[in-house]
Structure formats: C-alpha cells, structure tokens
Image: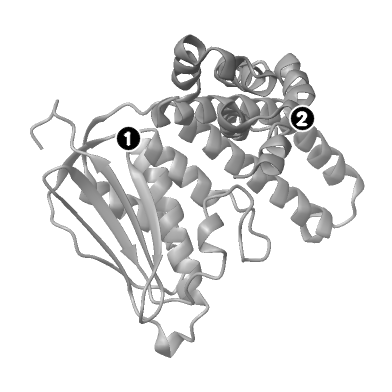
C-alpha cells in the first residue's frame, strides 16, 4: 500500500479497509496528510480505527518523532491489532451492513412483486418477474452473508450424511454425476449450518462449471473428506471449464465471471469458514477444472 491508496481507503464504507489505511498512516503519515486524517477521525465511529487514526495524526504532526521513548511504543501497540481482531471488526461491520440492507430492501421488493402481479399482464412470463426473481436471489445471498458472519456453534455431526444431503439438494435437475469418496461413518465437530453453506456454494460452482462441458466429455464431480492431526477437510474436484475470474479477487463481494451471478457465494462461504476458525481455498487444476477445499480445526472438546 502507498500513501495515496491509504488516503483513498479512509473514505471506504468498509471498516476493515479503513483500519488497514489507518494502520499504514500510523507508520508513514506526513504533515501533508494531517487535515485528511483529522477529518477521517471526526467521522469515524469504530474504536479500533479511531485509535489507529489518532496515532497517524500524531505521526503527521511530528509528536511521535519528538518523544519516541513513550509515544512511539504506544503507537506501535495501538496500531498493531491482531489479525483475529481485524477479522472480528470486518465480520461485525458486514453483519451490521447486511442486516440494514435486508431490513430496508425486503419490504420494498415484496411490495413491488405484489403490485406487479396485479398490474403486469402475463406476469409469470414477464421480464418483470425475472428481474424480481433476481432481486430475491440477491436478498437470499445477502442473508447467507449475514448468517455467515455470526459466531459458529460447534456440535458433533455425521459428515457423510451432511455431504449427501447437500448433494441431493443441489444436483436435482442436473445431468451431473457426483461421486462421494470419503469414509463413512465419519463424525466431525463443526457448525452444521456453516458447513452446509460452504459446501453448497462449492458444489454449485462445480456443477455449473461441469455443465458447460459437452455431455459426452463430462467427468464426475468428486467429493472427498478426511482428517489430519490438526484439522478436518473436505474437497470438491471438478473437471469443468476452470476459473475465469481473477484468482486474487474471487472472494471479493461482487466478483463473478458468470452472467446473472451476483458474486456473493464464495464470499459467504469464506466468511462461514472463518466463523468456525477454518479456511477455504479455490485452486485451478493442471489438467482441467478446479479444486475447492475447506478446512477447520479439530476441537479438543471432542474425541473425533
């Protein structure tokens, strides 16, 4: 990050972005930045960002240089926020934003659909209905994202059963073969809803990528799972068209290479895994297709 980028990020609606900018400026601010930092501090309502901005303000006014023995140490302490706390700030901001959006937009969409059904001839076959359906899909995706930001509630679950249920729901109506390769029975400790959300998005992407291949050349989607000494994992491997979106941005909200896709699925899946201390990776395969993998820790409260 450079100074112009940091100053621009201070205007972001994302508390996570503003925090990154403030932490950069806490180390590199100059006197030319003081007015912008001061204005940002006056508008800021997130305490962690406020703390980092105060340090940046002292850096810009030269106060840190004049008393390194006391203030510099506190500056480093204030601006060095652990990654977990940064993640928590981001999750809280995301939850607040999605809750506000749903509260404001859901009634409007519902009312618009009611009026459209009454006033639009042949509503069921109309483009108006298609657009309202897309809005409903957007609201459902925002709801998934909100749910994924909440802390998970781990419990012992049967993973084979969960994977089977997700497959049964997702590949209905698709001419796609899905092979389950993991052991059964296989008990894990996790939040069932978070795993469901992550696996559903991974399998949905694999099905869509596979369907673009001519029927005679399609290969089955393979779902495998197991454990290591430290974590559980599930992988979904397809031989579809592969990744077409920017690999560095696939977890950014709104990123999608597919028409009429909202770019919310992978961000929600990632947030779901983060909420249980896990991770998610999407990797292009050398031959063809993509490997989608989720991992989460083996909790010491369970013997599995």
Q: Disc 1 designates what residue?
A: 277
Q: Earlier in the sequence, mark 1 or mark 2?
A: 2
Q: Disc 2 designates what residue?
A: 32
Q: Nearer the viewer, residue 7 or 178?
A: 7
Q: Secondary structure at mark 1?
A: loop
Q: Nearer the viewer, residue 11 or 125?
A: 11
What residue lies at 69% left-to-right and 18% top-to-bottom? Answer: 61
Q: Nearer the viewer, mark 1 or mark 2?
A: 2
Q: Secondary structure at mark 2?
A: helix
Q: CA distance from mark 1 to mark 2?
A: 41 Å
285 lies above or below 190: below
Q: Is residue 289 left or right of residue 258?
A: left
x and y percent of residue 142 in the render? 60, 39
What residue lies at 79% left-to-right and 61% top-to-bottom? Answer: 125
**Residue positioned most to the left:** 303
Q: Residues within 10 Å of mark 2 (few under 14, many from 20)?
A: few
Q: Is residue 85 left or right of residue 229?
A: right
Q: On the rendered image, what quadrant is the C terminus found in?
A: top left
Residue 222 location, quadrant? bottom left
x and y percent of residue 206 in the render? 43, 66
Q: Is residue 142 left or right of residue 228?
A: right
Q: How many marks?
A: 2
Badge 1 vs badge 2, beta-carbon distance below 8 Å = no
Q: Nearer the viewer, residue 295 or 258?
A: 295
């Amino acid at each position: 990050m450079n100074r112009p980028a940091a100053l621009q990020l201070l205007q972001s609606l994302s508390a996570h972005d503003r925090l990154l900018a403030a932490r950069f400026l806490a180390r590199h601010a100059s006197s030319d930045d003081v007015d912008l930092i001061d204005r940002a501090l006056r508008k800021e309502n997130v305490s962690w960002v406020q703390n980092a901005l105060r340090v940046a303000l002292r850096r810009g006014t030269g106060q840190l240089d004049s008393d390194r023995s006391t203030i510099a140490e506190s500056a480093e302490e204030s601006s060095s926020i652990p990654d977990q706390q940064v993640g928590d700030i981001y999750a809280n901001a995301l939850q607040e934003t999605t809750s506000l959006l749903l509260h404001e937009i859901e009634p409007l969409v519902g009312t618009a659909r009611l009026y459209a059904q009454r006033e639009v001839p042949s509503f069921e076959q109309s483009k108006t209905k298609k657009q309202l359906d897309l809005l409903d899909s957007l609201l459902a995706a925002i709801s998934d994202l909100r749910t994924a930001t909440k802390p998970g509630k781990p419990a012992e679950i049967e993973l084979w059963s969960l994977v089977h249920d997700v497959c049964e729901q997702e590949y209905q109506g698709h001419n796609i073969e899905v092979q389950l390769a993991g052991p059964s029975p296989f008990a894990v400790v996790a939040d069932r809803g978070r795993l469901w959300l992550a696996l559903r998005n991974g399998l949905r992407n694999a099905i869509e990528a596979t369907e673009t291949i001519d029927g005679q050349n399609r290969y089955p989607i393979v779902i495998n799972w197991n454990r290591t000494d430290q974590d559980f994992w599930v992988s979904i491997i397809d031989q579809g068209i592969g990744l077409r979106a920017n690999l560095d941005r696939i977890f950014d909200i709104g990123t999608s290479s597919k028409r009429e896709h909202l770019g919310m699925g992978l961000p929600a899946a990632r947030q779901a895994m983060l909420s249980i201390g896990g991770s998610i990776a999407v990797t292009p395969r050398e031959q063809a297709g993509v490997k989608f993998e989720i991992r989460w820790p083996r909790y010491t409260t369970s013997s599995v």
